[in-house]
Structure formats: C-alpha cells, structure tokens
Amino acid sequence: MSTDFQQARISLGARLRELRAGLTGRDLAARLGWTQSKVSKLETGRQTATADDLRAWAAATGNPDTSDELVSRLNGLESHVRSWRRQLRAGHRPVQDALTVEYERSTVLRAWEGAMVVGMLQTADYARSIFQLYADLHQSPRDIDDAVRARMHRQHLLYGSGRTFHIVMWEAALHARVCPTSVLAAQLDRLTGVIGLDTVRLGIVPFGAAVRVPPANGFWLYDDRLAIVEDWHAELWLDEADSVSVYRRVWDLLDQAAVYGPHAHRLIGRARAQLDVS
C-alpha cells in the first residue's frame, strides 16, 4: 500500500467513526450482521470498505444521505491513477462532466500542453477530431457529439468573472496535424481571438526557446490544490501538496520560456500562414 493510499483509508475510517457517534462498535456490528473486528478494521484504516459496506454503514447509523459521499471517498482513495480504460467505459461525456466540476470550483487555472491545443480553447470541429482519435486509440464508446457539446459548454467559463486561465503551449501544438487542415486553420484563427480575452493569458513557448525543463506531458493545475496530468494510459489526479508543487514549478519554468501578446500572435499567424488554405 502506498502512504497516500493508507492516509486516505485512515481518513475514510475517521469519517465512518464520526457517523457511528452514539452507537458502540458492538451495536453497529450487530445491526449489520458483521463481526466487531470488521467494524474496528474499517474505522482504523486496516481494511478497505466496499461500496456496499459504505452504503450499509450509512443506513445503519441513520445517515443514509451520506452514502454518496462515502462511495465518492472510496473511489478517490482506490487510486490517483484513473485509467482511460476504466474512465471511458461509458464514453467521453462523463469524463468531461467530471472535469467541469473541477473547473467550476477553481478560480485560478494553469495549463501546459505541448502536443495540441488545450481543450478549453478548442473549436468544436477541432475537439471532434481529438475525441475521434482517442476513441480509436482506446476503443471506447463513440459518444463524440455529446463529448463535444460538454467541452463547448464548459468554455462559457472563459467569459465570466472571478476566474482566470493561464495557459502555456509549445509551438508544436500550433502545427500538429491532428485534424484536417481547414479545421486547424479555423482553430488557429480562434487562438488569435483568445489573446484579447481579459480572463485568459495565453503564452507560446517558441521552438528555439531555451527551456529549463523538457516539455513533456500536458497537465492542468486547479488553484494549486489539484494537478491533473495526462498520459497515454491514464490520468493522474494528484492532490498531495508536494506533488502539486512539483507541477507548479514545472509550469513556472515553462511560463518563463513563453512569449505573450504580439509575440504569441506572430507565432500563431506564422503557423496559420503555413497552411495551404485560403
């Protein structure tokens, strides 16, 4: 067991103990038809509860409305590694909905992306191409239209107040042919318009820039409380302070190599001019 896993299991056990207030462990075990040792192990983090265990605990302690919270805690402690195979069983739309929750609870968001335009700035056609590529890769259900609608809906957050987006991309993201040429052209046009938004600070790391860390996996930082890192097989959801601070340092180093404003505009325009479309 990892330290993080065990700490999360202990935290869940403490919550179970809170819910048992007013009942002895022996009484709760009798209500549930369990051994008293099982109750003790769950409360001290020496045994991992199942979802059914948690629902039964909530009902037996007179707190049935906490069952969803408890199951959510269980899902979180099982692993910080959220495999795409598991996440995409029901398609891409549920994944988009889960991410929207994190965007909505955050006020300062930072992103790094080296291989493609970040989802928050994608056009619908560009997003559709990306979802199709990943559906092919992971052989997942093709709910592409629903996923695109969810991603586009989330972009309304760009135009509200009280939230800022600090986005850094490598110049390679402007050139990657992950979609038809006409779609990429429209996507680059969209980026030039984004530069003027009050809520967005868009930086581009030029190909020739000196960087103090190798450009690698794309990731988002949510208020320095959560880092979500993408890999081919999984997403990493990291909320430990030490891990989040590593990604914040990576982001800061890449940000230092980026250009902004008119300089970023010129890089986007140069990529756009290289496309053979009118």
Image: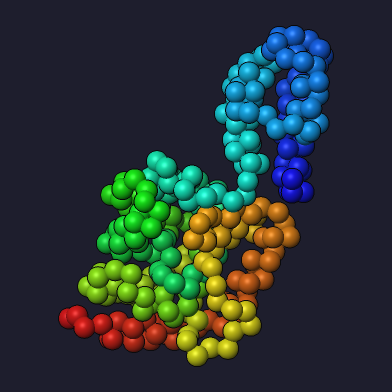
In this rendered view, identify the residue nearer to me: 203 or 71.
Answer: 71
Task: Quarter of the image for the C terminus: give it.
Answer: bottom left
Q: Residue at x 30, y 82 (%)?
A: 272
Camera sees residue 66: no
**Measured from the top left, where is residue 63 in percent x and y?**
65, 18
**Measured from the top left, where is residue 244 in percent x and y?**
67, 60
**Measured from the top left, where is residue 74 in percent x and y?**
63, 35
Q: Residue furthest left?
A: 278
In this rendered view, identify the residue nearer to me: 270 or 141.
Answer: 141
- Position of 167 relative to 6 (above/below): below
Camera sees residue 172: yes
Give the image quarter of residue 245. bottom right
- Position of 90 relative to 124 (above/below): above
Q: Residue at x 43, y 46 (%)?
A: 88
Q: Residue at x 26, y 82 (%)?
A: 275
Q: Is residue 121 left or right of residue 219?
A: left
- Position of 23 relative to 181 (above/below): above
Give the image quarter of residue 271. bottom left
Task: Quarter of the image for the N terminus: give it.
Answer: top right
Q: Residue furthest bottom?
A: 208
Q: Residue at x 25, y 70 (%)?
A: 180
What is the image's colouring?
rainbow
**Measured from the top left, where is residue 8 in percent x and y?**
72, 41
Q: How many marks?
A: 0
